[in-house]
């Protein structure tokens, strides 16, 4: 049983010693003391079904024994910087990661986070192309560093950073976007940005395959291949931010970009790949990777032996437990059941996503698509009381984000939807 400090003591210390900018989910925050597979346990031993852990990193399930063992064994032997000396944990993982990527994407730079990975990807693109301008999509999230906060295109996540050379293209959002599901129409804006906002050459186009923080927004069909063509004609590289969509999450594919039929020039990875351990990566081609040899480049802990041992264990667990298939089968079933809920409650304006990256958007007026923020918070809180944790996102904070560990079962999906149904029925 838990014998640590009480919830109230922790809250008081957070107020006193942690940055006032940190926030927590729920009116009455949970004190989570243990995790196992798709479950989290609070200080009273109460079990919660975790349908949001995927975002916070967990793909194999909380504290997966194989991953824990890999971390512990490597920690006992050696933990050091990634560079300076040889260690096989790092190269073993790099090789295994390259095997999961298409084309000539096989050279990795390791980082500690998604932000670092995207910062580095942008730097490499600028060095390789000799151009400066970056195009990202409105409603995107790419990180909170100097450059990535510039590419992130949601005012709620942006301070007044210098974002010279960053252009935010019209978002090909099938639900709220100007042109509905017509990907070809949206892509004209990318051409116009290049024509009217740059010298005609750009360094890169960066995009998520499904926007995560932005509220599980799938890009209109046909958009990404057409955008990639335009950007490449302008000399730019195409960066796929797979921080959320990568590592089997979308079920149908290992990488989110694959569903769009494109092959990027640079892929950025983080979150799930470490199953809770800080690990990120930029993977690119040998030719593009050379751009970073003109000066010294060093990241003390990015891809250190302990984190890469974890990364390798994650890839093995996904294979061994067929987690990608599970994400596809259970995710599709869950989406079907959520769609049935949409038919039942007017408050649900849209259900979308793929595999185990699903979104449910709440609107108080179906025609005007008025965001139903307070209802979103209410349902999240009620579901927590029923033992189910889901996330929220979207610019208006009115989209449930359902991103469970990939070991989520059909029974878990039923429990989640039943809890949601029950909550809606009492509103
Ligand atoms: N890219 C995407 C798509 C993300 O969702 C996030 C984090 N929410 C990041 C990058 C940044 O990752 P990190 O928080 O690890 O820096």
Image (cartoon, rainbow, N blue to C red):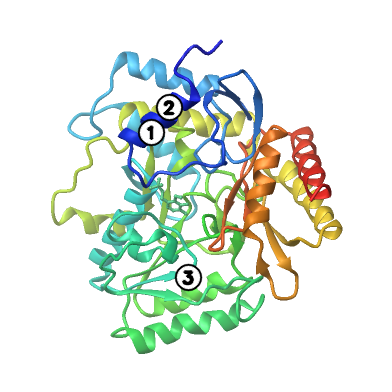
Residue occupying the point 34% across, 76% down: 235
Q: Are marks 3 and 1 in contact (CB under 8 Å)?
A: no
Q: CA distance from mark 3 to mark 1?
A: 33 Å
Q: CA distance from mark 3 to mark 2?
A: 37 Å
Which residue is nearer to you in this view: 5 or 61?
A: 5
Q: CA distance from mark 1 to mark 2?
A: 6 Å
Q: Which residue is mark 2?
A: 10
Image quarter hosting the N terminus: top right
Q: Which residue is mark 3?
A: 138
Asked if one can make out residue 39 in the rendered structure from this viewpoint, the answer is: yes
Residue occupying the point 24% across, 56% down: 290
Q: Position of residue 322 (x, y in %)?
A: 65, 34
Q: Position of residue 135 (x, y in %)?
A: 39, 72
Does 303 sit left or right of 294 as displayed?
A: right
Which residue is nearer to you in this view: 230 or 338?
A: 338
* 10 Å crowding of disc 3: few (<14), some (14-19), many (20+): many
Q: Which residue is mark 1?
A: 14
Q: Position of residue 41 (x, y in %)?
A: 60, 23
Q: Are marks 1 and 2 in contact (CB under 8 Å)?
A: yes
């Amino acid at each position: 049983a838990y014998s640590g400090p009480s919830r109230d003591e922790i809250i008081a210390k957070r107020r006193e010693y942690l940055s006032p900018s940190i926030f927590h989910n729920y009116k009455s925050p949970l004190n989570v003391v243990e995790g196992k597979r798709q479950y989290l346990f609070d200080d009273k031993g109460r079990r919660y079904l975790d349908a949001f852990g995927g975002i916070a990193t967990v793909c194999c399930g909380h504290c997966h024994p194989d991953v824990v063992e890999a971390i512990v064994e490597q920690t006992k032997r050696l933990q050091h910087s990634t560079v300076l000396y040889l260690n096989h944990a790092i190269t073993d993982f790099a090789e295994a990661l390259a095997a999961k990527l298409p084309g000539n994407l096989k050279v990795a730079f390791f980082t500690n986070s998604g932000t670092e990975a995207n910062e580095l990807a942008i730097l490499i693109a600028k060095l390789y192309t000799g151009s400066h301008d970056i195009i990202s999509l409105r409603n995107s999230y790419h990180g909170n560093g100097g450059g990535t906060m510039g590419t992130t295109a949601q005012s709620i996540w942006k301070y007044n950073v210098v974002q010279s050379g960053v252009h935010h293209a019209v978002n090909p959002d099938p639900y709220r976007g100007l042109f509905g599901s017509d990907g070809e129409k949206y892509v004209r804006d990318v051409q116009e940005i290049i024509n009217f906002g740059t010298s005609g050459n750009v360094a890169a186009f960066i995009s998520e395959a499904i926007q995560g923080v932005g509220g599980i927004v799938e890009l209109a069909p046909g958009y990404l291949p057409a955008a990639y063509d335009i950007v490449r004609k302008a000399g730019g590289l195409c960066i796929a931010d797979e921080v959320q969509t990568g590592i089997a999450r979308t079920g149908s594919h290992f990488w989110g970009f694959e569903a769009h039929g494109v092959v990027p020039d640079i892929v950025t990875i983080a979150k799930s790949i470490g199953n809770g351990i800080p690990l990120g990566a930029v993977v690119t081609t040998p030719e593009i990777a050379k751009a970073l040899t003109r000066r010294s480049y060093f990241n003390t802990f990015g891809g250190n032996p302990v984190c890469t041992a974890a990364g390798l264990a994650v890839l093995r667990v996904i294979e061994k437990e067929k987690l990608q298939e599970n994400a596809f089968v259970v995710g599709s079933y869950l989406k079907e059941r959520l769609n049935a809920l949409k038919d039942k409650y007017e408050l649900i304006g849209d259900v979308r996503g793929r595999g185990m990256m699903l979104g449910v958007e709440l609107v108080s007026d179906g025609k005007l698509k008025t965001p139903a923020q307070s209802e979103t918070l209410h349902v999240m809180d009620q579901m927590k009381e029923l033992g189910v944790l889901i996330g929220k996102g979207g610019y208006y904070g009115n989209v449930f984000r359902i991103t469970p560990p990939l070991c989520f079962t059909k029974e878990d999906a039923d429990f989640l939807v039943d809890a949601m149904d029950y909550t809606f029925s009492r509103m």
